[in-house]
Image (cartoon, rainbow, N blue to C red):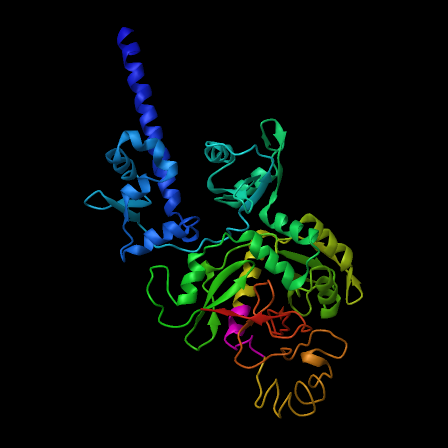
Amino acid sequence: MAAEVADQPKDLKSNEEEKNKLKATRQVEFYFADSNLPYDKFMWTLYSKEPDHWVPIQTIASFKRMREFEPLGIDWVVNALQLSDFLEVDETKTKLRRRTEVTEPKDQFQRSIYAKGFDDETSTLQTELEEFFDQYGRVNAVRMRRDQEKKFKGSVFVEFADFTTVEKFLNHDPKPTWNATELVIMSKEAYCDMKVQEKGLKGRSAETRKDVISNRGFNAFRLMRGEGKDASGGKDSEKEVYLDFLGHKVRIHKDGQGNGTVKEEDVPFVPGATLRFDGCGGSVTWSDIKEPIKQKFNGKAPFIKYTTGDDFGLVGFHKVLSEEDIATVKETVTSINSNEVSWSVPDEDSEKTFQLERAQTAARNAFGQPDRGHQRGRGGRPGRGGRGGRGGRGSRGGRGGGGGGRDGRRADGKARDDESAVAGEKRKRPVEPNGAPDVGTRGTNAPPVLLTTKKVKTNEGEAKPAETS
């Protein structure tokens, strides 16, 4: 019995040692993580200083969050870091680096939440906040929000590692509390939308304001795109084109025929940005969907997928929809083609497939290759004969082509079965809709993209120049 008592302090000391090593390792892993490294100017400078990206361990060990380990010595820090699967230490045991290249995080904005109601800042508050949010799941970063004088505002943005943890936190019952005070919590996107509404902003001004709120200032990916470099610091062989997809930048590649395409693994899944309608009666009138939704969503045209003859379709939006947004759609679009319709949230697999189709359609249009069925005529806009071909804008048969309607629609506004048309397109100008992932066409009154699975017909929504680097 005496021997067991004598061994106990040793076991406790060993457990404390392992706990400290894990804490130190995790802190350094955070410094080098995709969620921090490319957004921390000082860390990125250290990382980029050497071609092989080795960083002095002594420098990392001197950081404020590492000072508690100073009494243990630099050798202790080195030994702790050697336990990491994410980092590697060089042969001299004086430098470390990531084992993998830096990659731009996906779904970062959607995996982030806003929380308010915290006490005044103390020297240990950052650590306490991280431990608090850790109880709900894996946390990538906790960012304390500050005013222009660098004073803590009592609120934070927290990036969780997965959507499951986000839902767990936002729907926790009872609601999360801090020192017995219930916190104000919401998704980061909901917070940005709230601030935009408070200021009465719409359209481009609203999007700019969101960017200001959500951006953290320095962004290595944006910097590299501007310099034509990749994540390793080397020059790209050719100019890159990126698609603005629901708040994410997705690179557009060219296939063997020179058409724009995106890699499936590069397209982030953003759940909650799609609705399904049922009961249209086998026919769709674009204006029944497009115009009301544009009016309710700051002029943003939706992306519509519909197959002629089906009684249902999918509608993609430029953002994740809140419960209030869904209710607005249900109240605003009650009928399509004079048929009463119902709205619902599609299943996850359907939405994933739909979002990939959105991105691929956008990519094709980025390099001037819209969906098959649309032909660019000689001499200007679609059709031959100058500004729109024989007989006016569009092609033969008057304004809009043989069907008599503008921009490839029938005169009654319904989708046509035999061809596609793109409104307001200008040559050699890759474009993308304002705030949405679909590459469309320039022109504020253009109809939305309509992608079909049998005979393809497209009509793109509002657009702006595609970002290139």
Q: Residue furthest top?
A: 2
**Start-end of magenta stretch:** 361-373
Q: Residue furthest right?
A: 338
* Residue 370 inside the magenta-drawn segment: yes
Q: Quadrant of the N terminus?
A: top left
Q: Residue at x 73, y 84 (%)?
A: 404
Provide residue 277's location: percent of width, then percent of height. Answer: 70, 59
* Residue 364 inside the magenta-drawn segment: yes
Q: Residue furthest front?
A: 149
Q: Can residue 35 be spotted in the picture?
A: yes
Count of number-bearing discs: 0
Provide residue 417's location: percent of width, then percent of height. Answer: 66, 76
Q: Residue at x 27, y 55 (%)?
A: 52
Provide residue 270's location: percent of width, then percent of height. Answer: 55, 54
Q: Can residue 318 be spotted in the picture?
A: no
Q: Residue furthest left?
A: 92
Provide residue 467's location: percent of width, then percent of height. Answer: 50, 68
Q: Quadrant of the C terminus?
A: bottom left
Q: Report the front residue among 305 and 174.
A: 174
Above-or-below relation of 435 to 71? below
Above-or-below relation of 313 to 135? below
Q: Write down the quadrant of residue 352 in the picture.
A: bottom right
Q: Is residue 445 left or right of residue 347?
A: right
Q: Report the front residue among 348 and 135.
A: 135
Q: Report the front residue among 165 and 67.
A: 67
Q: Write down the quadrant of residue 87 in the picture.
A: top left
Above-or-below relation of 213 to 463? above
